[in-house]
Image (cartoon, rainbow, N blue to C red):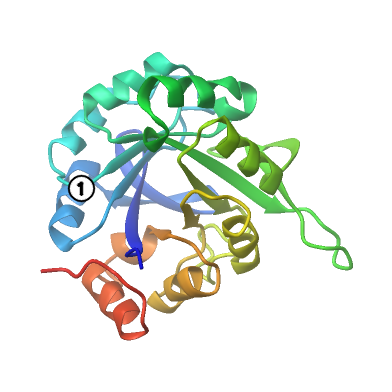
Amino acid sequence: MLTRRIIPCLDVKAGRVVKGVSFLNHRDAGDPVALAAAYNDAGADELVFYDITASSDERAIMVEVVERTAEQVFIPLTVGGGLRTTEDMYRMLRAGADKVSINTAAVLTPGLIEEGARRFGSQCIVLSIDARRVNAPDEPPRWAVFTHTGRDPRATGMDAIEWARRGVELGAGEIVINSMDADGQRTGYDLELLHVLSTTVNVPVIASGGAGSPEDMYQGLAAGDADAVLAASIFHFGEYTVAQVKQYLAERGIPVRQVV
């Protein structure tokens, strides 16, 4: 059985790591370079770096911060935020990223997924989806795709599961699914969303939004069938270490790469 991945997420705004609730009320969590180095040493399996206002501000991602972050880590680094062209992707890969994550730009220009996969390989292309429940209480569950969630969420009218399926067909090698309802709430991932998506697409699914404890991460992997779990607050503010989470998971039968 493949080991499951624990991935700290660095949401970067104005050169600092921040963490908010439902994308608002951001709290400073530190310097991205220092945090990246600490997580690398702590046994994280990967890191995700999001420039969270690049798309809403309609500007390029901060290349120099990515370069300095990449210099500190020897685990896979995924970078996203404000990537609009394959040249943007190339710039991030040259700066030290192993994968690039696209969200808003992919919705606006789906061919970007295909072009990126053809140029760099599907293993480099991560499709990030911000999804919110939109069904009425008496209806079957349904999630819609939103863009520009760093500051100005915009409804697309697209079904999140169908968009993920199409993204994989276009060449995305991984899906990060972020529950907008759960983001920053620390009450657990949207397990129903995770399960539906994980059993629909044939690429790794990474759970994002809602982790507040090792148990939440266990449920995301066991009940949600995710291949990896993303977390921010519980790591950034010292509530749990990566090693503690991995020990918790291993004791419950989840295969993880042990921290040495």
- How dense is the environment of label 1, judged by Cα within 10 Å: few (below 14), some, or many (20 and up)? some
In the picture provided, is 154 more to the left or to the right than 249? right
**Residue 179 position (above or below residue 52):** below
Residue 38: % across, % down: 16, 55
Q: Residue sitting at 38 percent across and 75 percent down? A: 214
Name the image quarter holding the N terminus: bottom left
Q: Given the image, on which type of amino acid does mark 1 rest? A: Ile
Find residue 52 and report its image quarter.
Answer: top left
Secondary structure under tag 1 reads: loop
**Residue 212 position (above or below residue 253):** above
Q: Residue furthest front?
A: 1
Residue 207: % across, % down: 49, 58
**Residue 214 position (above or below residue 137):** below
Find residue 200 and report its image quarter.
Answer: bottom right
Q: How many marks?
A: 1
Residue toward you, 225 or 22: 225
Residue toward you, 126 or 134: 126
**Residue 84 position (above or below residue 226):** above
Q: Residue furthest right?
A: 138
Q: Residue sitting at 39 percent across and 59 percent down? A: 231
Q: Residue sitting at 65 percent across and 60 percent down? A: 196
Name the image quarter holding the C terminus: bottom left
Q: Residue furthest top?
A: 87
Residue 128: % across, % down: 51, 41
Q: Which residue is mark 1?
A: 75
Residue toward you, 144 or 122: 122
Q: Residue sitting at 22 percent across and 72 percent down? A: 243
In the picture provided, is 105 more to the left or to the right than 3? right
Residue 250 seen:
yes
Residue 77: % across, % down: 28, 41
Find residue 80 and report its image quarter.
Answer: top left
Residue 22 seen:
no
